[in-house]
Image (cartoon, rainbow, N blue to C red):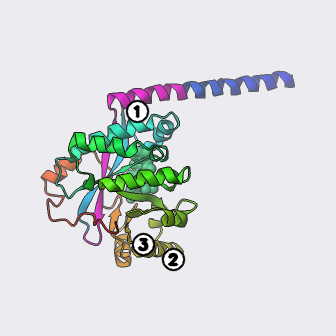
Amino acid sequence: QGKREGRGTFRVFEDSMDTELRERAALEAELREAVESGEIEPFYQPVVSLPGRDCVGFEVLARWRHPTRGLLGPNHFIAIAEETGMIADLSYRLLRQACRDAVSWPPHLQLAVNIAPQQFQDRGLAQRILGILAETGFSPQRLEVEITESALVQDLEAARATLTSLQNLGVRIALDDFGTGYSSLYHLRELKFDKLKIDRSYVDTITLSEERAKLVDAIISLGRSLGLVTTAEGIETDASVDWLSGQGCDFGQGYLFGKPMPKEEVDSMLKAGAILQQDAPGIPAKAR
Ligand code: C2E
Ligand code: MG
Ligand code: MG
Ligand code: MG
């Protein structure tokens, strides 16, 4: 009897494995189609200067406008795209669309795009990005590429080559999610970034924990002493803005200033004059 039960349990397990594999394969196929048919679209989250809170640009964040499941965030598909090698295709299409959207926005508005670690190892990356900039007429000076430290751990020399060729085009490089990697100081020593983005996990606790606040203060000082500008991500309260501004953090991003939104919403904000049309400071090209 025990034996039969055991087999039964195994069968159930096998079936659920089967289902999981089938679901995964279906999702992959669906994602491939979605990428090709343009269902993955850029959303834009405002980045503001501190303390003035002027919009200086947007981070481009991928969203899947799924025909039946609604709007899906990156946690539903970026990992799959990376594992299956679709990420490069997805990113180039997203960048092309973002450049087309933003090319008619006031020229002081910058775009920041996320590039996956494996793409950063690709020696053709700068050339591909340059091609998209040329094709869309979007100026390299208005583009910032965000990478995480996992982009640097595989082959530092390849990463250095990519970083340098992008910077030579006039594109700035931001180190994203700073403070969550293993070897932050090592990478700051080895590579010349333009910006540090302080991870949300630090920012959302600064007004609650004195230790976290001290760490954020130290990151801002570190950035400044290396000639890098700093952006705090995940700002949700006025108290955080006041504190970060006081410590000399240059830029902020978070739900307090705006959630990621579709192009149409940016367009209507621009029309309504809710975003300063000119004369905003832009991101200083420090330390090059
Ligand atoms: P990230 O690059 O660190 O982007 C910031 C994330 O924090 C975004 O999540 C944004 O919506 C969220 N966020 C910003 N402010 C707040 C806030 O005040 N409160 C809270 N709770 N969240 C806030 P999202 O859009 O879900 O993206 C998650 C991650 O997915 C991104 O983290 C990035 O690593 C990745 N990602 C997004 N788009 C792309 C893409 O086109 N390519 C690649 N390779 N990765 C992408
Ligand atoms: Mg980012
Ligand atoms: Mg980040
Ligand atoms: Mg983050």
Instruction: Tell me whether the residue at label 2 lies in contact with that at label 1, contact meaning CB atoms closer than 8 angstroms.
Output: no
Amino acid type, mark 3 = Leu
Amino acid type, mark 1 = Arg
- The location of residue 155, given as percent across then percent down, is 54, 50
Q: CA distance from mark 1 to mark 3?
A: 45 Å
Q: Which residue is mark 3?
A: 226
Instruction: Tell me whether the residue at label 1 lies in contact with that at label 3, contact meaning CB atoms closer than 8 angstroms.
Output: no
- Which of these two is toward me, 27 or 70? 27
- The location of residue 203, given as percent across then percent down, is 44, 66
* Secondary structure category for the residue under label 2: helix
Amino acid type, mark 2 = Glu
- Which of these two is toward me, 117 or 98? 117
Sequence-first tag of 1 and 3: 1
* Secondary structure category for the residue under label 3: loop
Extent of the magenta region:
24-52
Q: Is residue 45 visible?
A: yes
- Which of these two is toward me, 84 or 193? 193
Q: Which residue is mark 1?
A: 69
**Residue at x 76%, y 23% (from the top left corner):** 8
Q: Give residue 18's quadrant in the image.
A: top right
Q: CA distance from mark 2 to mark 1?
A: 42 Å
Q: Can you tell which of label 3 and label 2 is closer to the viewer? A: 3
Q: Quick one: label 2, few (<14), some, or many (20+) residues within 10 Å?
A: few
- The location of residue 69, given as percent across then percent down, is 40, 32
Q: Can you tell which of label 2 and label 1 is closer to the viewer? A: 2
Instruction: Tell me whether the residue at label 3 lies in contact with that at label 2, contact meaning CB atoms closer than 8 angstroms.
Output: no
On whether residue 256 falls in the magenta region, the answer is no
Examine the rendered structure and indicate whether residue 6 appears above or below residue 224. Answer: above
Q: Quick one: label 1, few (<14), some, or many (20+) residues within 10 Å?
A: few
Q: Which residue is mark 2?
A: 210
**Residue at x 18%, y 52% (from the top left corner):** 269
